[in-house]
Image (tube, grey):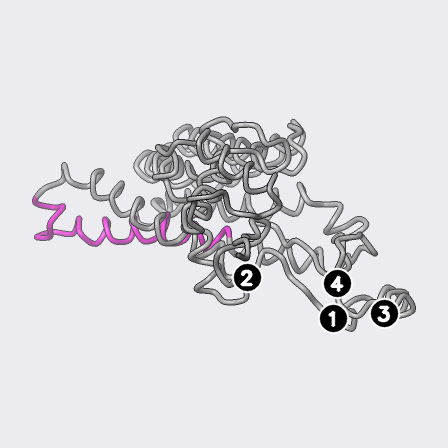
Amino acid sequence: MTEEKIDLSKSLYDQDAFSGRAAHFYRSVNPLNLFRDHPAAKELVDRVKLNKGVLPEGVRKDEVWDAKYVYESAYHPSTGELTFLPGRMSFQAPGNCIIASGMIIFYRTPIQAISGQFINQSFNSTVNYCNSPRPVFVPQDFLVAAGSACAAAFGLNKAASRFPPLIARLVPFGAVAVANGINLPYMRRDECFGKGMPLEDDDGNIVGHSPSLGKESIAKVVLSRILMATPTMVVPPVVVTQLQKPGRLLARNPALANPLTVLFIGLSLVVATPACCAIWPQRISTSIENLEPELAADLREKGIKTVHFNKGL
């Protein structure tokens, strides 16, 4: 009888298709994973890995895949240690819902705008630390991220006072967009402005670095982060502002404004987070013909035709 095996280094879903990537990220960031039995999931995943992918007797494949996603939602990818709860990917939706709601509801004064951005960047730094291949906290990176967001919030808040109320409601989104455009290239500056994106051959060996692919990858990550924030931080303020006009729902029931804002943000996050993470594959393969001429020539001499790299999220 042939032993049934499973490769837990891969995803259950087709990562070459948007629908497969979206399904993968939906299971990875599912907030319900916070309430699962993490030690049991880790034990099952470790047993399968120890058995080189062979399923234990009486265990189904779907049980192992389920355990894999629960395990990966709670444990650090490199150290294997249980991560700090606010830093888990499964806490992204509830955490961002609380913070985004606060930023959109409390936006009128510079202090409110700056405080919201500082809390948001602190949360982002926690997530980055808990999911980084090498969990090292770099104060300089945090200060640049928080400083750019707070400066943008202060400037936009001051400028918005001259415009209609809706523009003021969009200040948090503008600050988040500006901060992403600054802090992501800064934190990944070696890939963008230094050696470049590390490239691997089919066996996972690093065979070169490409600055052009580094810039392209970071641009995609920045765009996906901004798109992720759009339905969360643009749609709710626009809808609430429209509903507050004379004769409409929130004009008659102003107490519903904040609960509806939180509801819209929560629903947006459930859809936007996995969808925007899935716009482009995280791990990408490309022909050496798309690389810098000197690098392509060097790899061609080594008989390498295709290279692989991790775009990041």
Residue 49 image point, x, y percent? 59, 42
Tell me the residue at 42%/28% (across/down): 111
Q: CA distance from mark 3 to mark 1?
A: 12 Å
The amino acid beneath tag 3 is Pro
- Disc 2 + disc 4, Cβ < 8 Å: no
Q: Secondary structure at mark 4?
A: strand
Q: Nearer the viewer, mark 2 or mark 3?
A: 2
- Is residue 209 or residue 148 the one in the foreground? 209
Q: Nearer the viewer, mark 4 or mark 3?
A: 4
Quadrant in the picture for residue 131: top right
Which residue is disc 2 drawn over? 280
Which residue is disc 3 drawn over? 293
302 to the left or right of 16: right
Which residue is disc 4 drawn over? 307
Q: Secondary structure at mark 1?
A: strand
Q: Secondary structure at mark 2?
A: loop
